[in-house]
Image (cartoon, rainbow, N blue to C red):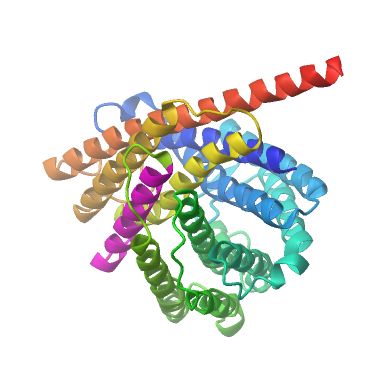
Amino acid sequence: MEKRWFLLSIVSLGLGGFLAFVVAMARTPGVYQYFPPGYFYYALIGHVDLAIVIFLLSFTVLVWSRVYHADTKVAFYLSLLGFLGVALSAFLGKGTAVSNNYLPTIVHPIFFGGIILFFCGFTLGAFSVLKSSIRDIISPDPIKNAVSVSVMLGILMMLAVIPSYLRAGDPSNVYIFYERLFWAPGHIHQFLNGAMLLYAWYYLLALLGSEKRLNFLRFINLSFLIFGFLLFLVPVLYADPISMPAKIFTEVSYAVGLGIPMFLHAFNVIKGFKPDVKNPFSSALLLSLSLYFLGVLIAYAGIKADLRVPAHYHGTVTSLTLALMVISYKLVQEYGYTQRLSAISRIQPYLYGVGMILFILGLYFAGRGGAPRKTYGTGYTQDPAVLFSLVIMGIGTLMAVIGGVMFVLYILRLLLRGQAYHGLQEDKG
């Protein structure tokens, strides 16, 4: 089932990337008027849910299947149906678009059916590898250690939905309801992404032939689980999971439980890393580290509820996206779809990575100038500095989209060509 999870993740990333282009162009000076304002929020929700949530979690189950050789057939088909529901609801633009954090929502039966099916599949996938993963919770192998931690966090994330739902309140107040529902699970998901980023960094480091390891770091990873459990308790301990005291507790847990271990691991990775600009695995690791630290630096510089927020999380999240993209080049070789990678594998990480850096910097400086989040067009400002920053964002978007399209089309071509070839061989047999 690995190959099917792989295909699902690539298609989800491709569709989400297309919607990201729509969103970015809809707030870029000079071109935003060509994009329908009524569709903006559906595109934004579809981008987040497809390119961030479904892509990353599908790839996560792929990694679990690789490491623990679990049977995830039923989990896959549930998740596939869920993906189709989420994608269809976003592209149709039907229902009420709710721009809550972590899992933005479209209040429509197709969306709800899709997201429930996808997470049922994801949860089933997590439980299918739980028994095997427990033994690696303190493994000296940083790859297995990170994967094991990610399994535990995946289950904890899904369990956190239960107390969150009980504290969510009146569903008719849609923004507050879904903000409360996904606040704790959404933060635990960031810990899961952190564990997967460690997997990706150490996997890329291994592909580059580095054997440097600091074994004591495996115990630091337990902080992911300790603080992940504390986040699970937020809707239990606080009557309102998004009240100011709850938010402070959540953000402190997030900064200490995730931030400090990630810094220590990044230092460990950098010690064993010798950059090679012609090697895609090396360039991916360098750019992934750069994106992550750019996102973290933005957070430490102080952010408010403006475009600096997406600047921060696009840095930390796309550091993982870029790393998984380049790991995909290794997977297509292992799966027998190609023996030799084309020049695309060397060019694409730079296009996507540098594009995302420009995109993030544009968002950040526009946010410093007061540009609001989740807002169509540029009618809210005439500030030349803000408009210039948004143009930089638009240029970065074009570069990242070109890099993303190159990646998706290249991988899909290899996968479809490989499937056709294997099918022909079976017919001949």
- The vertical placement of 111 against 67, above or below, is above
Question: Which one is in front, 205 or 266?
Answer: 205
Q: Residue at x 52, y 25 (%)?
A: 409
Please indicate whether residue 102 sits to the left or right of residue 267 in the image.
Answer: right
Q: How far from the left and from the top, in percent, is residue 327? A: 52, 44
Q: How far from the left and from the top, in percent, is residue 381? A: 20, 43
The answer to whether residue 179 shows anywhere in this view is no
Q: Residue at x 36, y 39 (%)?
A: 376
Q: How far from the left and from the top, in percent, is residue 200? A: 50, 54
Q: Residue at x 75, y 42 (%)?
A: 1
Q: Looking at the rendering, which quadrant does residue 255 occupy?
A: bottom left
Please indicate whether residue 294 sits to the left or right of residue 404 in the image.
Answer: left
Q: Residue at x 53, y 58 (%)?
A: 199
Give, as a single range, the part of the protein colored magenta.
281-305
Question: Which one is in front, 106 or 218?
Answer: 218
Is 371 one of the magenta-colored residues? no
